[in-house]
Amino acid sequence: MGRSIVRLLLACGVIVSLSMGIRHGFGFFLPPLTQEFGWGREAFAFAIGLQNLVWGMAQPFAGALADRHGPGRVLTAGALLYALGLSLMTLSATPGLFAGSAGLVLGLALSCTTYSVVFGVVGRIVPAAYRSRAMGLTAAAGSFGQFAMVPATLGLIDGLGWLPALLILAAMSLLILPFVRIPAAMDAKRPLRANGSILAGMVRVFTLAWQEKGFRLLMVGYFVCGFQVVFIGVHLPAYLKDHGMSGATASLALALIGLFNIFGTFTAGELGSRRSKPHLLAGIYFTRAIVIGLFLLFPLSTLSVSLFAAAIGFLWLSTVPLTNGVIATQFGVQHLGMLSGAVFLSHQIGSFLGVWLGGLVYDTTGSYLPVWLIAMALGVVAGLASLPIREQPSRVMQQAEAAG
């Protein structure tokens, strides 16, 4: 890969690292915020679930705008919304206000600053031979953000309190802005297609993609992925606290997830350039189910939590470069941002259900066990759904593009 590609990947890596790194620490705000305002866990979980749902619903539009007009304005708007949403969280004393700031505003921010927009740029600029590797490296950067930001977020909350911590994170989100210039400038060199209604174009492309069974099966797998990772990411600290484990153990667990996620996403990107991506996806989902089952089977200890975090971390976002790589192979890169966003919507519906159901079931039964079992069963479903996917260009899309 040339020097300009390396610069692109570094810039995109920083953007994703900041965006994903900050959001992965939201689970640490659950105890202090619910205690401060007297909410149940469902109120907090609903807002974070709404964030994931809004993120997913807005993602196809953000991706389509970046596909058509370039990523610069989309990424800039996302960084500003990120800072605004985090700042407004400090004023959100009711569940409704909190749902507006942490849910709506931050959901829109994440849709503009994460994988669909960034992978759209990477997919268009990086040659096909290096595409899977490049996506793996970019996803690994998001994992590094989690590894770095999770303990930093806990340290800010413990040292300064939850309110100053949110304001500092808001300022940090603005560090995205200086790095927007590189992907914006490189993507501006391609011819942009700005004719016609963007909504009509999105409907047309999605309708064509939906006709492919493999695309629908990718959405099934991504739904499960979202359910699992967001349930674990948000509720694991509270789950461990309920079982008498310290905040330091929870911080260690989330940091290990981020650390091993770096290796997992990089490895998935590398293997995806040489092996069947659908088969790799199936292996990831099956293995997640096994890891969750073992975690529930063995007694909780610092060692068992660490081993679980390392294993699930290796599998955490390894689905991302593989899923987006299959989409690029099936449908090309012209609409990669939009179609990646459409599949990601399925991921975020799963995320919403995972995080909200976790809070609802806990408030109703006093236990997270039913949701852990659902997450394990869904891993088997996703693994089975991934096996029939074929990694080949879509005939339907090719015929439609040829017909103009």
Image (tube, grey):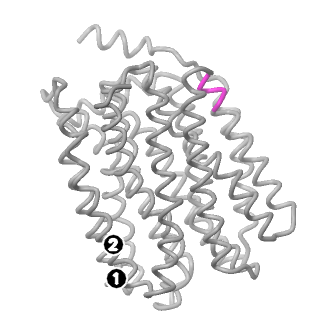
Residue 277: say if magenta: yes
- Label 1: few (<14), some or many (≥20) within 10 Å? some
**In-image side of 404 versus 294 (left or right):** left
Residue at x 64%, y 45% (from the top left corner):
315
Q: Quadrant of the C terminus?
A: top left
Residue 90's label in the rendered image is 1
Q: Residues within 10 Å of mark 2 (few under 14, many from 20)?
A: many
- Say left or right for 22 vs 373: left
Most foreground residue, 169 or 90: 169
Name the disc covering residue 86, or none: 2
Secondary structure under badge 1?
loop
- Judging depth in this view, the residue of 108 and 366 nearest the camera is 108
Q: Position of residue 257 (x, y in %)?
A: 62, 57
Residue 43 falls within the magenta-colored stretch: no
- Do tag 2 and tag 1 residues touch (Cβ < 8 Å)? yes
In the rendered image, which quarter is residue 40 located in?
bottom right
